[in-house]
Image: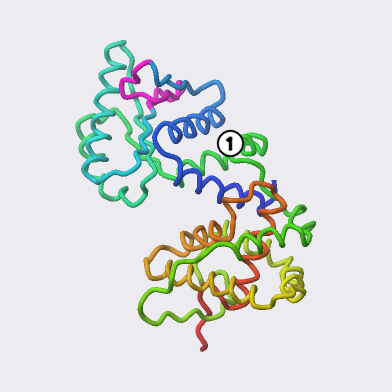
């Protein structure tokens, strides 16, 4: 598995992490743990009444609880952690079993900082039990370190590798351009927002995985430019560029991170619409084209 393919898997994993809710998210996390701890992870069936346990890592005497409601609040999340911890402790204690670790997995990263006091209280009340909260990065570390390419394909779907990126042809670019021509971006927010050109991946503070994706797309910049140059209606390319500008401006106005902006633009370009690896390679090439042609992300300031 090359770095480009690994980065594509991460992008797909992040989308699943954010989009799946309730039992779908619970089942998805269960599969990650089953793949990551083969023969060592026990999924608790939903129909049995989990008693605060969605899964058990046998070798670690660890209980896993998973939570992904459609919406939540700080107080609701804190109550859920405490409730699952206490129910899990009661369940294992009633069977004369010791719980040495409690892992709480949820998919609302913005709330993580608010539950530190709750974790501190649980640890002080139960000093023999390790308490962990897992969000995306913890799940990704498990996937990246323990899951094989076949397991990632099974969990996330197939993604292109560097060789497939190198084989990108015009039909896949056409599919992406036609998709973009049909979608509408959000209107520009109030106020002036300058969208300068972009020359340096590092300056935009994208993580290494998203940098690998954009670098992979760079290899096909000439092919994308040739496609736009050959279009009978030259206004389509500018309309798509304007769509990217509007979407990027809306992201900046909402103050989301550079990586969240990239993920939003990826979705806008059809990254979560297309499932065929060649088309995903096309999405990568088109985003890289507009990244390089001054339409999205920040320019390095002049010295």
* 111, 177: nearer the viewer: 177
Residue at screen point 36% across, 80% down: 191
* 78, 266: nearer the viewer: 266
Q: How many marks?
A: 1
In the image, residue 102 sits, relative to residue 188, either above or below, namely above
Residue at screen point 59% across, 54% down: 271
User: In x, y percent, where is residue 71?
Assistant: 32, 44
Instruction: Say which residue label 1 marks.
Output: 155
Farthest-out residue, bottom: 303
User: In x, y percent, where is residue 212?
Assistant: 62, 60
Q: Locate the N terminus by quadrant.
A: top right
Query: Toward which corner of the image does residue 216 lie, by quadrant?
Result: bottom right
Range shown magenta: 48-63
Farthest-out residue, top: 95
Decide: few, some or many residues near mark 1? Use Cα within 10 Å; few <14, some 14-19, many ≥20. many
In the image, residue 240 sits, relative to residue 300, either above or below, namely above
User: In x, y percent, where is residue 137?
Assistant: 46, 47
Is residue 53 on the magenta stretch? Answer: yes
Name the element at disc 1.
helix
Please state if 30 lies on the left or on the right of 287 as rendered: left
User: In x, y percent, where is residue 49?
Assistant: 34, 18
* 53, 48: nearer the viewer: 48
Please state if 17 lies on the left or on the right of 80 as rendered: right
């Amino acid at each position: 598995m090359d770095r480009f393919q690994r980065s594509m898997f991460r992008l797909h994993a992040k989308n699943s992490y954010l989009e799946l809710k309730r039992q779908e998210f619970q089942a998805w996390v269960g599969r990650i743990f089953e793949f990551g701890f083969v023969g060592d992870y026990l999924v608790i069936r939903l129909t049995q009444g989990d008693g605060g346990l969605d899964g058990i890592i046998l070798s670690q005497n660890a209980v896993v609880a998973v939570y992904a409601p459609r919406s939540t609040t700080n107080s609701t999340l804190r109550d859920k952690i405490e409730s699952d911890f206490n129910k899990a402790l009661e369940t294992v204690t009633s069977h004369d079993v010791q719980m040495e670790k409690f892992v709480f997995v949820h998919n609302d990263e913005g709330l993580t900082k608010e539950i530190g006091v709750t974790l501190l209280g649980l640890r002080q009340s139960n000093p023999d039990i390790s308490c962990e909260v897992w969000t995306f990065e913890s799940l990704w570390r498990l996937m990246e370190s323990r899951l094989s390419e076949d397991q990632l394909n099974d969990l996330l779907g197939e993604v292109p590798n560097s060789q497939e990126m190198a084989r990108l042809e015009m039909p896949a670019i056409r599919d992406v351009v036609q998709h973009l021509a049909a979608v509408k971006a959000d209107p520009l927010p109030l106020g002036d927002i300058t969208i300068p050109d972009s020359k340096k991946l590092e300056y935009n503070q994208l993580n290494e995985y998203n940098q690998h994706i954009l670098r992979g797309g760079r290899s096909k910049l000439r092919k994308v430019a040739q496609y736009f140059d050959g279009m009978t209606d030259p206004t389509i390319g500018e309309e798509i560029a304007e769509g990217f500008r509007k979407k990027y401006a809306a992201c900046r106005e909402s103050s989301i991170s550079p990586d969240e902006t990239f993920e939003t633009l990826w979705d806008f370009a059809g990254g979560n619409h297309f499932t065929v690896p060649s088309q995903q390679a096309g999405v990568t090439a088109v985003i890289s084209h507009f990244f390089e042609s001054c339409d999205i992300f920040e320019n390095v300031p002049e010295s």
